[in-house]
Amino acid sequence: GESVGLHLPTLSVQEGDNSIINCAYSNSASDYFIWYKQESGKGPQFIIDIRSNMDKRQGQRVTVLLNKTVKHLSLQIAATQPGDSAVYFCAENRYSTLTFGKGTMLLVSP
Amino acid sequence: GAVVSQHPSWVICKSGTSVKIECRSLDFQATTMFWYRQFPKQSLMLMATSNEGSKATYEQGVEKDKFLINHASLTLSTLTVTSAHPEDSSFYICSARARKNQPQHFGDGTRLSIL
């Protein structure tokens, strides 16, 4: 199994490809979910959010899918660009605080 | 919109000194601010939650006397690391939220190095 803190899961894609980043959340009582992008040395940047009464939400080049049955969240990035390279975190909101997932590093090759 | 400014971005100091980090919401009023700590290649760990005008709520295992939090106004929260030691070296990040069930917006973090 994977050890927390030794490495991040990494997704490597070519520029122009579509990227899908997955996240499993832990608590069925969570009512709000957010995807954040974190570039090296910076704080997380809000990408898109979704409430638990929705299955899908679209933004500019990004789509978030929520499957409450299996407690799974995904972030789809269309036409991935080198500037999308970063670590992506999902976060679940419970009792007005966020619990962050482990993160996935997205590497986009030109 | 929703800009959060954190200062300083980098600080190096000697063991035993106290360090204050500021977090400001620039274009909105933040009823709640949060302080996180992040180790390399790891996720964000919540340290404490502060509501304007109230005492901060600390997560289990976080020392209140070591990490002093003040949220004196709707646009400013401060974290003071008291008598800092090398094991306090980390990346500290603040966030601010206008209302419940709205996204938190993050500052760019403070890299703290204690020699």
Image (cartoon, coloured by chain):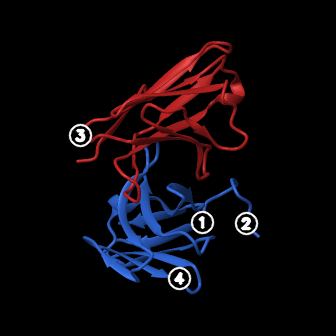
Chain colours: A blue, B red
The answer to which of marks 1 and 4 sits earlier in the sequence is 1
Q: Which mark is residue B27?
A: 3
**What's the CA distance linking mark 2 and mark 1?**
9 Å
Q: Which residue is mark 2?
A: A2
Q: Which mark is residue A9?
A: 1
Q: What is the crowding at mark 4: few (fewer than 14 residues within 10 Å), some, or many (at least 20)?
A: some
Q: Which mark is residue A68?
A: 4
The quadrant in which residue B7 appears is top left
Q: How far from the left and from the top, in percent, is residue B88?
A: 66, 29
Side of B52 relative to A95 (left or right): left
Q: Residue furthest right?
A: A1
Q: How far from the left and from the top, in percent, is residue A32?
A: 45, 67
Tag 2 and tag 4, C-beta contact below 8 Å: no
Q: How far from the left and from the top, in percent, is residue B34?
A: 49, 42
Give the vertical position of B73 relative to A41 (above or below): above
Residue situated in front as seen by the camera: A95 or B24: A95
Secondary element at tag 3: loop
Give, as a three-letter code, the residue at label 1.
Pro
Q: What is the crowding at mark 2: few (fewer than 14 residues within 10 Å), some, or many (at least 20)?
A: few
